[in-house]
Amino acid sequence: MISDLDQTIENLLTAEIPIQNGEIDVKFDQPTREWSVRLSRPTINLFLYDLRENNVLRQHQWERVMEANGRSHTHNVSQKRTPFRIDCHYMLTAWAANPQDEHRLLTRAMLALFRFPVLMPNQLKGELANQPFKLQTRLAGHDKLTNPAELWGSMDNEMRPSISYIVTLALDPWTAVTGPAVRTFTLDTGQADHLPNQHHLQEGTAVTNATIGGTITKLQEPQPGLQVTVKASGQSTTTDKDGRFILAALPYGTHTIVVWSPEGKSKEKVITVPGSNYDMEI
């Protein structure tokens, strides 16, 4: 994936400077002394000198995986961990026969990169086309490359103007986990003695309520924005974009739920709580 990022940056510079007939090379090499003496033409070099996680964008959570049509699964739920966000730190330098040409080349490269604080989808190559987030860039950050002499010394080369260029991409090592959707969630409330060592509720004080979830479909297509009501209590909710609904604080037993179609027609279904299926086809 990092090689795809290199190709994306090279294509961007070639198009935006622009570079014609290979008059300028774009490389991604370590600029050592031996490397620099072998250069035969003006060169823009982006040396990837550091990779590290972006702590500001870090997210440790699960997200639902959608189907190809943009909906979540009806009967099963697929989830996966959020990907890591990695900062790719490049050192941008220009190489030419004299300092004036180097400075002109460096300026043209900076102007090209400054125009794209976010890399456009049509610019992304290879696996980058499937990135879940926009690829943000940062050029010439004031808090980056604060000690260039140390970096150049480690490469045994003379120090020259160098600019930091950071691209943040997502690396996803996780696979999706699929399981049946939760239909009923039960909550027992009451009074208890000797907490937290004992968790038994006092006899006669326990109240059990359930939260249930189901899906409303028509011709097997989820129906969003429909009103779902418990007939006896009047408790009501509305289906989401995937046709799902949630009803909370239902006591155990038999209930009748009513759904109104967009045409104003109602349909009822008798359910038992707890149960294994609260879906309705209208």
Image: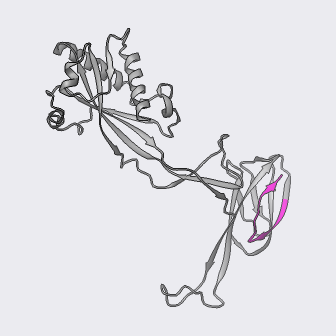
Residue 119 horizontal/vertical position (percent): 43, 29
Residue 252 horizontal/vertical position (percent): 74, 75
Residue 140 sits inside the magenta stretch: no
**Which is more toward the observer, 21 or 30?**
30
Residue 271 sits inside the magenta stretch: yes
Left or right: 268, with 194 as reference point? right
Q: Quarter of the image containing the N terminus?
A: top left
Left or right: 103, with 282 as reference point? left
Q: Is residue 261 above or below residue 68?
A: below
Residue at 76% from the left image edge and 53% from the top image edge: 216
Labels in figure, total: 0
Q: Quadrant of residue 27?
A: top left
Residue at 32% from the left image edge and 27% from the top image edge: 28
Q: Is residue 61 above or below residue 144?
A: below
Q: Which residues lie in the magenta part?
A: 268-282
Left or right: 43, with 245 as reference point? left
Residue at 14% from the left image edge and 34% from the top image edge: 153
Give the color scheme: rainbow, by chain, secondary structure or one colour.
one colour
Residue 142 horizontal/vertical position (percent): 23, 36
Q: Residue furthest top?
A: 21
Q: Is residue 15 above or below residue 241?
A: above
Q: Quadrant of residue 16?
A: top left
Residue 248 horizontal/vertical position (percent): 67, 67
**Which is more toward the observer, 224 or 134?**
134
Q: Is residue 118 above or below residue 96?
A: below
